[in-house]
Image: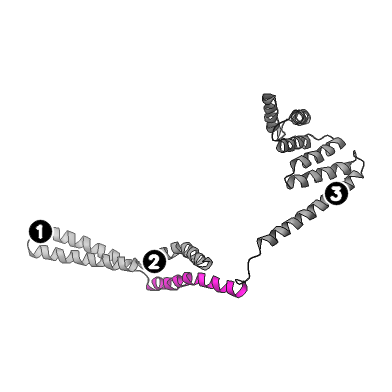
Amino acid sequence: MIWLFIVLVSVVVLLPCALVLRRGLGARDRHEAALALHRAQLAELERDRGMGLIADSEYATARLEVQRRLLAEGARTPDPARTGARAPVIAGLALIPLAALGLYLARGRPNLPAEPLAMRIRQMDVSGQDDARLLALLKTRLAGLPQDSPQAQEGYVLLGQAEAARGDWGAAAQAWHHALQAGFDPTLAAQTAEAQVDAEGSVSPDSADLFRRALNAAPKNAPWRLLAEQRIAESEHAH
């Protein structure tokens, strides 16, 4: 089924190109039909003149106009070389899916069985265990540093970012609280308060107070100012 699906996708992708080229191949047919029409009009004029259905002056004018159209159409004769050159292009388009299939069969491994889901889950578990060990090691080293030192502050910021990447917003907020103890930063305070909101599911009084402290210390153009004001309003409305 997978190969049938690939072929169908290839046909859908290449079909517009083939249709455009196919319309180009019909130009000669349209040109010959126009020439035949003009010749039929000349023959009809001759017949009407012979039957006395048209005056000589009208016949001359109409015949001149038809001859002018016939000459103009004859000047637009399609180039046989260009018309015939489309056939190799269409053939090339048809060969693209076959060439892709041949390349895959030559370089790919279609007979390789799919990796079992259980194996992929085990690999994810192993990766998660490695991350947990690294975070535990980082926490141990941070605990041995003076909590008000710049090194500890930077370490707790990184720890919070790692916990946030794992989706553990409570642990991220806790780590960032430690970083704020080493030195208050309004942007980090707003980030910590938002992590608490994500962890708790609502704006608690502690989170609202942290947002207020962040707003008081932040510049007027802080990009998160509107969010902090909205969170404070939510807290006041709820309590």
Camera-side mark, 1 or 2? 2
Q: Residues within 10 Å of mark 2 (few under 14, many from 20)?
A: some
Q: Residues within 10 Å of mark 1 (few under 14, many from 20)?
A: few
Q: Are marks 1 and 2 in contact (CB under 8 Å)?
A: no
Q: Residues within 10 Å of mark 3 (few under 14, many from 20)?
A: some
Which residue ends up furthest to the left in the rendered image?
52
The residue under label 1 is which amino acid type? Ala
Q: How much space separates mark 1 and mark 3, taking CA atoms?
A: 107 Å
Name the N-terminal-most of marks 3 and 2: 2
In magenta stretch: residue 98:
yes
Q: Residue at x 23, y 65 (%)?
A: 37
Q: Write down the region rendered in magenta.
A: 80-107
Is 231 displayed left or right of 105 in the figure? right
Q: Residue at x 22, y 64 (%)?
A: 38
Residue 149 image point, x, y percent: 90, 40
Is 84 displayed left or right of 145 in the figure? left
Q: Are marks 1 and 3 in contact (CB under 8 Å)?
A: no
Which residue ends up furthest to the front in the rendered image?
118
Is 151 displayed left or right of 125 in the figure? right
For the residue labelled by badge 1, is the local secondary structure a helix, a strand or a loop? loop
Camera-side mark, 1 or 3? 3
Q: Residue at x 88, y 41 (%)?
A: 150
**Nearest the eye: 34 or 154:** 154
Q: Which residue is mark 3?
A: 138
Residue 115 image point, x, y percent: 66, 65
Q: Which residue is mark 2?
A: 22
The residue under label 2 is which amino acid type? Arg
Q: Which residue is mark 1?
A: 55
Name the N-terminal-most of marks 1 and 3: 1
For the residue labelled by badge 2, is the local secondary structure a helix, a strand or a loop? helix
